[in-house]
Image: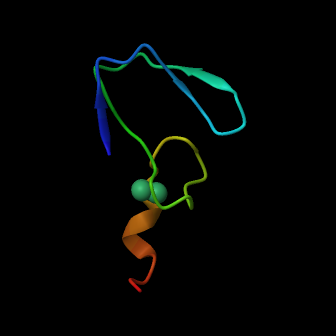
Amino acid sequence: MLLRGATSVQGVDGTVHDVRRPVVALCRCDKSSRLPFCDGTHKVIPRR
Ligand code: FES
C-alpha cells in the first residue's frame, strides 16, 4: 500500500516513525523486517 504526503506513520506497537519521502510503501503482509514499511519480502511469500 502506498502512502503519499504523510509526515509520520504509527506502527501497531505505537512507535511513531518519521516519514521523509513523498511516497512510502506500507507492509500489508506482516512479514517485512522493517515494519510498518514494506521491504519487498512479500514478493517471496507463496500465495495462498
Ligand atoms: S507488503 Fe509486506 S513486505 Fe511488502
Q: How is the image coloured?
A: rainbow
Q: Nearer the viewer, residue 34 or 8?
A: 8
In the displayed structure image, the side of residue 10 where residue 43 appears, left or right:
left
**Going 56% across and 61% down the picture, which residue do you hit?**
31
Q: Is residue 31 above or below residue 10?
A: below
**On-image quarter of the C terminus:** bottom left
**Going 58% across and 45% down the picture, which residue do you hit?**
34
Total numbered badges shown on the rendered structure: 0
Image quarter of residue 23:
top left
Q: Is residue 44 above or below residue 16?
A: below
For ligand 1, the image quadrant comes to bottom left
Q: Position of residue 32 (x, y in %)?
A: 55, 55
**Going 38% across and 83% down the picture, which residue do you hit?**
47
Q: Position of residue 42 (x, y in %)?
A: 42, 65
In the displayed structure image, the side of residue 1 where residue 8 appears, left or right:
right
Q: Is residue 18 above or below residue 25?
A: above
**Going 69% across and 27% down the picture, which residue do you hit?**
15
Q: Position of residue 38 (x, y in %)?
A: 44, 48
Image quarter of residue 13:
top right
